[in-house]
Amino acid sequence: KMSDDENKTIFGKIISIFWEPSATFRALVIKVSWLDIVVPLLLVLLVALAVMPYITPLAVEEQKDYIAQSDRLTEEQKAQTYDRIDQQAGSARAYITSAVFLVIRTAVVAGVLILVSNFLFGGEVKYKSMLAVSAYANLVDIIANAVKVPLMLSQQTVRIYTSPALFLQDNSTFWFRFFANLDLFVLWKVILLGIGVGIITKVKTSKSIWTILICWIIYCLAVAGLGGLAKI
């Protein structure tokens, strides 16, 4: 088994993250190269950039509708905001921002995994290893796009929920924001991160998964709370 993990190619690790994630993470215990970080990120980014031209017009319209309903902005301020949204939507800046956000998110998640691994579990894990775990877990975004983008296009809205928020009516409440963050695809990623941390730190998998799950729920609660402060 160990020799199989040792000989796993990048392609093999990418495929097995969906079917046998433990095999991917065992291979990372043996060796982590920068390709283990760069290749998964590039794949996720290419898919994200490919769907942006289809999703951006829907997002722009919904942003404009949201602004139109605001009673805090004057008509002149609304017109200026519409112009700014239109300029940003068609620019290269939107694509660059998407790439930068993916890299930052991967790095931040890896930082959280390091804290869990080295401080809570007493491991001596290198940041590069956790960057790779974070990068491979991001591959779930490809499946999420494959499911969500056709639904967005058919329903002409970016507000597609694969979370308990689907069953709530009022989208302005704390609980709606909280449940919206409890996305099934993000849950899948969290479980992958938990498996990765468990294997690399040699901690019982159930313990590492529960620890990462708790971190995620705290994050969702914080985002839902802060979301209530963001009013236009």
Image: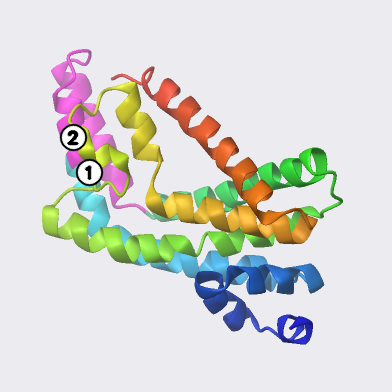
- The residue at which mark 2 appears reads as 64
Q: Which residues are magenta?
A: 62-91
Relative to residue 58, is residue 9 drawn left or right?
A: right
Q: Position of residue 227 (x, y in %)?
A: 39, 24
Foreground: 178 or 86?
178
Question: Can residue 86 be seen at all in this image of the molecule?
Answer: yes
Q: Position of residue 52 (x, y in %)?
A: 32, 58
Q: Position of residue 110 (x, y in %)?
A: 67, 49
Foreground: 141 or 185?
185
Residue 80 located within the stretch drawn in magenta: yes
Q: Amino acid at mark 2?
A: Lys
- The residue at which mark 1 appears reads as 60
Above or below: residue 130 compared with residue 33: above
Q: What residue appears at the point 72 percent right and 86 percent down from the top-left corner?
A: 4
Q: Quadrant of the C terminus?
A: top left
Question: How is the protein colored in the picture?
Answer: rainbow
Question: Can residue 99 be seen at all in this image of the molecule?
Answer: no
Foreground: 173 or 204?
204
